[in-house]
Amino acid sequence: MRTSLNAPASSERRVALVAVDSPWRDPNGTFYSFSYAIEKLRASLRSDPELHDVEVLLLDLCTDDPDAFFEALREFRPTLVGLSTYIWSLDVFTGLVERLRRHDPRVVIVAGGPAARRSVLDLGVYQPLRDRLDAIVPGEGEQTIRDLVRAHREPDWRERVGGLEIPARGLWRRTRNVERPEIDAYASPYQLGQAPLGKTGYIETFRGCPIHCAFCQWGEQKADRVHSSDYLARHLEGLRAADVPNVFFVDAAFNLSPRAFRNLAAAERQVRALRDKIVHGHIYPTHLEEHHLELFDTFAQVQASVGIQSFDEEVLARMQRPFDVDRFERVLKRMRGRLDVDIELIFGLPGDGPESFWRTLERSIELGDTVKIFRCFALPDALLERADTLQIQFDPRSFRITSCEGWDAEQMQREWERVVARASQFARPILNDDWVGFVVDGSRTLRGIPAERTPEVTISRAPVIDVGTRRALGARIGAAASGWNLVGVMEERGGLALELTTPAGAITLHAEPLVEGRRYFAARDRIAYSHRGAVDRTLARELLSVIDGVHADVAPLVARDALE
């Protein structure tokens, strides 16, 4: 490990917000992800005039190598590190935090996000991470990150910041309670013009969920806070300026908050930002009304995911999931032809079993345009807290349930192999370890998506170039723009993703075959370049220089058959 750089001055506040990007693959090949959570935290800091002098680094890398994260953070010399923690980032963060502590024990390290929970960190495999953290944020982060930035260089910061849980020798203590934030009080990344350009856009219209299903991480969070129509209008304007190809709603469902939907409809009537966009989100079908469909009719296309999970009413009742199967089938007839219906199922629900599951799957194939089947996970705030009562055994690294009430381990493995085989019989199958998806009828395209926009997508997180080529690329990047470094090269979306760090933060440069009609940051010789991560005017000029520097090496690495 290299020796540390000079420590920041006592008055400096240098904040690193860190996430592990997890690429999402869907049958339509239209989802281009980035970590919206850390973008929202940065927006909270940037919109607070008292924190204008704080340096903020966003580190959102698509790699499982802790050293890649550490090297970027070592150069930045943070005083505060905030980890956006999901189940797929726990192992990376365990390695990263161990390196950070050896390098500079003074840095304050705080974990937030859905996996930053006592029930997760008390598992034996994650206790080393727990014991090196200063605190976790189990609630919402917009105000807490501001409070942490203000206080973290003071010796009594743990007493001054509310809403934290502090680990100490295997025990936990809470700091003072905090009020739930007023969600309109925090600007979104799109309102500030700092969200990545040309990537999937995100929008939240309300927070929480009125339904408290046992398997879901929404937990007991109320759904009584909604964004105003003015707030949503400013957000929609920002989405349009960011040139997003599609929009993903992070709400529990489009139609579970009547107030939020009314505000969205009013904002969209004013801005009309979604009329040429593919819109993704969830629908609770038994609450679907004509006014919902009327708004959806104004969008270019809607991919509506319906979380059926199971058609077995006893299983749903056991999971505290209210659902009227008969009403769903009636509503589905109204949706047909106006929405593309994406049915989602959970394989291995406690209380379910192979026979019931297969009835559900075959019925879903009859009803849906696309189908996704997810393996059941013991997630925090959900089945992880109910593991004992439901006889759940799970892999603590993947959180995948290996056996539970209604499924023994042998059944779970055998039936999942059958699911993968069944999915592979359909059009454009997406086959992963933890979920599979497919288009039911491959003879047609989904509404509003032409055939050339629906390729089978292949993504790999493994390095795709040798050490010599990587060093050559790194040298060219450094020569093209001072302070730029190459972290890794990955296959992604039928092209290449170059993970880069810059003096202003981390970005990903993506190279893929040019498709006529799409907009890109730059194009060279029918290779299209786009980026994930905020880029201002200065950085944009430097990025163009980087593209010119690496293009001769990158172009041959993009699949030749994809260029035809």
Image (cartoon, grey):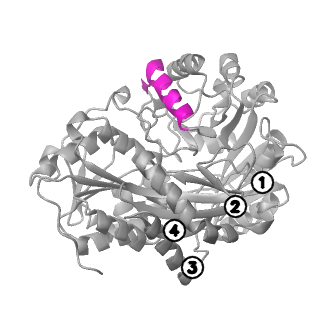
* Badge 2 or badge 3: first in the primary sequence: 3
In magenta stretch: residue 241: yes
Q: Nearer the viewer, residue 353 or 91?
A: 91
Magenta span covers which residues?
225-242
Looking at the rendered structure, which numbered label has been put on residue 526? none
The majority secondary structure of the magenta stretch comes to helix
In magenta stretch: residue 375: no
**In the shown orientation, is residue 81 left or right of residue 24?**
left
Query: Looking at numbered disc 4 in the image, what kind of residue is underneath it?
Result: Asp
Alpha carbon distance from label 1 to label 4? 33 Å
Provide the secondary structure element on which disc 1 rests.
loop
* Badge 1 or badge 4: first in the primary sequence: 4
Looking at the rendered structure, which numbered label has been put on residue 494? 2
- Location of the N terminus by quadrant is bottom left
Q: Nearer the viewer, residue 191 or 306?
A: 191
Residue drawn at point x = 72 percent, y = 69 percent: 414
Marks 3,4: beta carbons within 8 A: no
Query: Looking at numbered disc 2 in the image, what kind of residue is underneath it?
Result: Gly
Marks 1,2: beta carbons within 8 A: yes
Residue drawn at point x = 40 percent, y = 42 percent: 40
Q: Nearer the viewer, mark 3 or mark 1?
A: 3
The residue singled out by tag 4 in the image is 395
The residue singled out by tag 3 in the image is 469
Badge 2, how many Cα within 10 Å: few under 14, some, many 20+? Answer: some
Q: Nearer the viewer, mark 4 or mark 2?
A: 2
**In the shown orientation, is residue 209 left or right of residue 295?**
left
* Badge 4 or badge 2: first in the primary sequence: 4
**In the shown orientation, is residue 462 left or right of residue 370?**
left
Q: Nearer the viewer, mark 1 or mark 4?
A: 1
The residue singled out by tag 1 in the image is 455
Q: Does any portion of residue 347 appear in the rendered image?
A: no
